[in-house]
Amino acid sequence: MVFSLYTRIFFTFTTPSPFDYIPIPPMVRFPKDLIHMTAQRIETGTHASDTLGFSERLFSGWLEMYEDNRLYLHYIISRERNEGHTQALLQRWLTEGYDVRVVMPRPIMQHILKKFQFVPSIERLSDHYDNDVEVWYQP
């Protein structure tokens, strides 16, 4: 090893600090059962769906709601087509601050999502699907 002015300066300013001896905590792994408890499946016809505006009178389907205000819309059928209920529902959720994500939307739903500047991405939703799936979200 060759010592130069640079190595002396380097060693002078890199003396150990008391914080160098604090151990790095190990990676925390949560049991799979605990992770599943953070999502709540909501189907139309329930009090939770009515509270979200996802009423059985207007829609059929289901979604998942996570504790961090994420809504994964897995399946939706509007009972009254071309009435704007789906757009109004999405607008309501976005206005209320939900992070809305739509799983594998059909072309007509993609058209609606593009109006709200949603973009496609790929996610792994291992609870429901074996492979990665297309999920649209608003960045």
Image (spheres, grey):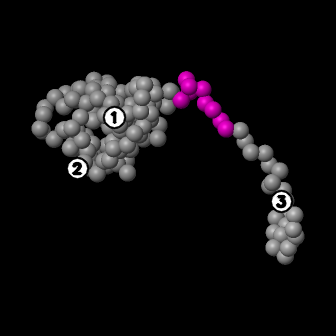
- When asked about the image quadrant of residue 4, the answer is bottom right
Q: Secondary structure at mark 2?
A: helix
Q: How many marks?
A: 3
- Left or right: residue 101 compared with residue 25: left
- When asked about the image quadrant of residue 6, the answer is bottom right
> For the residue marked with disc 1, what is the amino acid?
Val
Q: Earlier in the sequence, mark 2 or mark 1?
A: 1
As rendered, which of 2 and 73 lies closer to the eye? 2
Q: Given the current orientation, which residue lies at the most extreme front position? A: 2
Residue at 21% of width from left, 29% of height from top? Answer: 77
As rendered, which of 128 and 62 lies closer to the eye? 128
In the displayed structure, 81 sits above or below 95; it is above
What residue is disc 2 on? 115
What residue is disc 3 on? 17
Residue at 37% of width from left, 43% of height from top? Answer: 121
Q: Secondary structure at mark 1?
A: strand
> For the residue marked with disc 2, what is the amino acid?
Lys
Mark 2 crowdedness (10 Å alpha carbons): few <14, some 14-19, many ≥20: few
Q: Earlier in the sequence, mark 3 or mark 1?
A: 3
> For the residue marked with disc 3, what is the amino acid?
Ser
- Left or right: residue 3 compared with residue 95: right
The range drawn in magenta is 27-35
Q: Earlier in the sequence, mark 2 or mark 3?
A: 3
Residue 30, magenta (yes or no): yes
In the displayed structure, 20 sits above or below 60; it is below
Report the Cα–Cα distance between label 3 and label 1.
49 Å
What residue is disc 1 on? 103
